[in-house]
Amino acid sequence: MIFGDIPLFLYFCPCSTPFMAWKKKYRCEACGYECDSYEGTGLFRQHITAVSCDNCHTVQQLVVGGVIGDLAPSFNSEVGRLCLRCGSTSIHIWDKQTCPRCGGRMTYTGEREFWS
């Protein structure tokens, strides 16, 4: 059951810290490129960082921290990670404003979904 935009079970989650997490859609005003950006912390204490790849000109999502970070320390940060699409090391944290394809302006479309 969903209460507003948030599933009802999350209001009664036994987690020690509350979390609110959204997947938001962005679109380039110039070329129409679309991508998602994740905000907040997931159910397993992870967060997802959007990175822009200078090689394949896309935005990719890297899971950082949480349970996976406890088991695999290399997942505790973005340092040393590769582009998930092309394997390039030429990635940087995306600023949520610059299109990786054409350099145009990216804007939030208003579309969002809950994620955990």
Image (cartoon, rainbow, N blue to C red):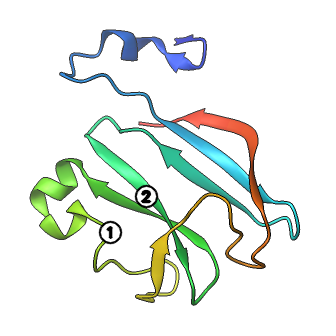
94 or 19, which is in the foreground? 94
Amino acid type at image mark 2: Thr
User: Where residue 93 appears, x then y in whole percent?
Assistant: 47, 67
SS under mark 2: strand
Task: Provide the secondary structure element on which disc 1 rests.
Answer: loop
Mark sitting earlier along the chain (1/2): 2
Q: Position of residue 54 (x, y in %)?
A: 57, 86
Which residue corresponds to mark 2?
A: 49
Q: Quadrant of the C terminus?
A: top left
Please state the horizontal and vertical placement of residue 17, each as a whole percent of the image: 24, 24
> Considering depth in this image, is 82 or 104 the residue closer to the camera?
104
Q: Position of residue 64 (x, y in %)?
A: 30, 57
Q: CA distance from mark 1 to mark 2?
A: 8 Å
Badge 2 density bin: few <14, some 14–19, many ≥20, Cα 10 Å: many
Q: Are marks 1 and 2 in contact (CB under 8 Å)?
A: yes
Q: Which mark is residue 43?
A: none
**Looking at the image, how many numbered discs can be counted on the residues?**
2
Q: Is residue 65 left or right of residue 30?
A: left
Residue extending farthest to the right is 30
In the figure, 32 relative to 114: above or below?
below
Looking at the image, which residue is at 11% across and 54% down?
70
- Three-letter amino acid code of the residue under disc 1: Glu
What residue is shown at x 40% (from left), y 88% (from top)?
Answer: 89
Q: Which picture quadrant has residue 96?
A: bottom right
Vertical order, 16 against 109 (above or below): above
* Residue ID for mark 1: 78
Image check: 45 left or right of 49?
left
16 lies left or right of 111 = left
Residue 97 found in image quarter: bottom right
In the image, is residue 96 above or below residue 79?
Answer: above
